[in-house]
Amino acid sequence: MHVGDGFLTFDHPLDPDRVLGSVGKVSMQGLVENAGGTWPASPAEAVAAFFVLLGETQDAGIEGEPRVLPDGSVEAAGHLEDLRIWYRLVPRGGSAAVGIEIRAPNRSWQAHAATWTAGLVIGGGS
């Protein structure tokens, strides 16, 4: 695990180069505007913008539409190069959010990704 200012990353000991996770502070406004959108925008639009930005420098894309969960967070899945990616955005007020990203080799990791993204407890503050 690596902890930095406003983020942490982790990997899986069985495949540390291909099973990765990260949690960090996100500016939804930054995502949307850097992807060519306008602020204000919904959290679902910010998630779509996340995938647009990934796709500018890598073979990446979202599959389907972002899904808004009962708690107001938004999740989506897609691909990044030869990996699967699961992303969850938890709005914290204004433009502030927490982004949770899991990358793994294939769909068999989906249950693990769901556990990691849903099981994260985010404390107070921004």
Image: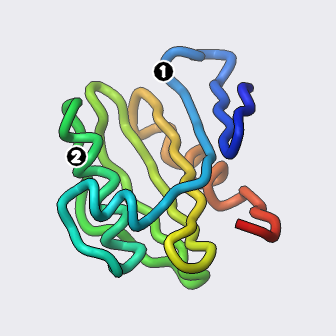
Q: Please, what secondary structure does the residue beneath circle 1 have? A: loop
* Residue picked out by circle 1: 18
**Which residue appears at 30% of the width and 34% of the height?**
80
* Residue picked out by circle 2: 61
Q: Position of residue 26 (x, y in %)?
A: 52, 56
For the residue marked with disc 2, what is the amino acid?
A: Gly
Above or below residue 21? Residue 14 is above
Figure label count: 2
Q: Position of residue 16 (x, y in %)?
A: 59, 16
Q: Position of residue 91 (x, y in %)?
A: 56, 72
Q: Quadrant of residue 75?
A: bottom left
Relative side of 2 to 93, left or right = right
Q: Position of residue 59 (x, y in %)?
A: 19, 32
Relative side of 66 to 4, left or right = left
**Which residue appears at 40% of the width and 42% of the height?**
85
Relative side of 102 to 11, left or right = left
State which quarter of the image contains the N terminus. Answer: top right
Pick the residue in front: 35 or 23: 35
**Which residue appears at 71% of the width and 39% of the height?**
5
